[in-house]
Amino acid sequence: MSNRRNFLQRALGFAGAFSLAPLAAKAVAEDVSDALQSLNKRSPLDAASDEDLWARMAQAYTVSPNIMNLNNGGVSPQPKVVQDAVDRYYHLSNEAPTYYMWQILDKGREPLRRKLAELAGTSPEELAINRNATEALDTVTWGLTLNKGDEIVMTRQDYPNMVQAWKQKEMRDGIKINWISFNLPVENDETFVKAFVNATTAKTKIWHITHMINWTGQILPVKKLCEEARKRNIISIVDGAHTFAHMDFKIPDFNPDYYGTSLHKWLSAPFGTGMLYVKKENIGGLWPLFPNDKPTDSNIRKFETLGTRSFAPEQAIGQAIDFHNAIGSKRKEERLRYLKNYWCERVIKNPRVKLHISMKPEYACALGTFSIDGMDPNDVVNKLFNDHQIHTTGIKWENISCVRVTPHVYTTTRDLDRFVEAVLKIASS
């Protein structure tokens, strides 16, 4: 607790948080760190509903006071300490780019890799640092050797970039996609497992598994699906874009062959940062997306041959991990789920409002979705923003039509009260 407090006092204090006068900035830093120290004395469930502490913690962010941002699921804002780290590394790079970028900042990737591995529960030799979940998962899609006629199983509710990647591989290499579809929400593990198994044939080589469906927030039983895949000697690829640093788990808990995620979502790392996990024994057989001189090597670093990159966002991932750890993974998960349940339980007071997400903790966390009978989701989104300055996102994909709402740790229940009031007003008009 002392380490967490000292970290935030130093980080926020040195940064001159929120462009306040030095004394005011110091007061903000001390208040945030005191709030974190208090949170860490509470159990995750008990801390989830302590509005005073979370409101004080929210001072670590610089979000707009004029727009209520409830679309953190797309990209999350970074706490001030992360923003300042990016600025610091970027300005340093500009002093002498080829020296500071390649001889100083580039050397920071190994300690960063160890830090990420500790958070993910993996070996550092199994993690590659890249720019987003799309790059991570495309590395796997295009790096695996498949033959014409080989089959993969994936759902029609998977993320578009992953869907398009596999469709392109189907067009180019002659593989076959066996599609499955779900009417969400689903509150039964076996429904998912049975669907994947039923779509599997003797030619199936891969199961592409989305941990949390981005459209609605539906959580899939990833551990069970990876276990079933392994029984059948099928490769498991997990899209964890919406769950890493959102929920309390370690990647080996699921035992996937491959796992890709974005770090600019729930970790609140700099924009354009991501991570790829490859089980150690699979590295040698996976071709890198960007070629290098040793494409069949078993060194995880072969997946980082990108050429010139911006080192500033990459190196500031470390500050984002520190901030996340200062809160605590389980404490963060319980707060996010509490916020989703808070607004969901209130908007359904109007019979025209329908939820499209489970209220059971094993099937949902921060992401929640709703619709209003007789209204197009985009019309609801527009009214929320134009009339109430609340930013959400409309979802229309396959058999899904709803409004997605994604709060973050800086969101207060007072904010959500205003959101609920706006939804009920729209539904009653």
Image (cartoon, rainbow, N blue to C red):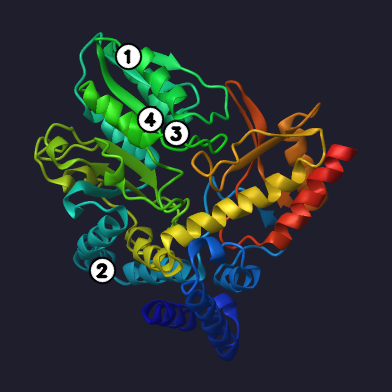
Marks 2 and 1, the one that precedes in the sequence: 2
Are discs 3 and 4 less than 8 Å apart at CB?
yes
Q: Closer to the N terminus: mark 2 or mark 3?
A: 2
Which residue corresponds to the image point at 44% horizontal and 58% vertical from the top-left? 330
Q: Which residue is mark 4?
A: 209
**Label 2: which residue?**
100
Q: Is residue 400 visible?
A: yes
- Classify residue 151 as left or right of residue 347: left
Q: Position of residue 128 (x, y in %)?
A: 25, 48
Q: Residue at x 69, y 60 (%)?
A: 413
Residue type marked 4 = Ile
Mark 4 or 1, nearer chain start: 1
Between marks 3 and 4, how big is the CA–CA gap? 8 Å
Q: CA distance from mark 1 to mark 3?
A: 18 Å
Please state if 8 lies on the left or on the right of 290 as rendered.
Answer: right
Dot label at residue 220 = 3
Question: Are the two marked residues, 2 and 3, in contact with CB atoms closer than 8 angstroms?
Answer: no
Q: Are marks 2 and 1 in contact (CB under 8 Å)?
A: no
Q: Position of residue 344 (x, y in %)?
A: 69, 45
Residue highlighted by disc 1: 200
* For residue 380, above or below residue 3: above
Three-letter amino acid code at the position of disc 3: Leu
- Residues at marks 1 and 3 touching, judged by CB atoms closer than 8 Å: no
What residue is drawn where x is 19% and y is 66%? 103
Amino acid identity at mark 2: Tyr
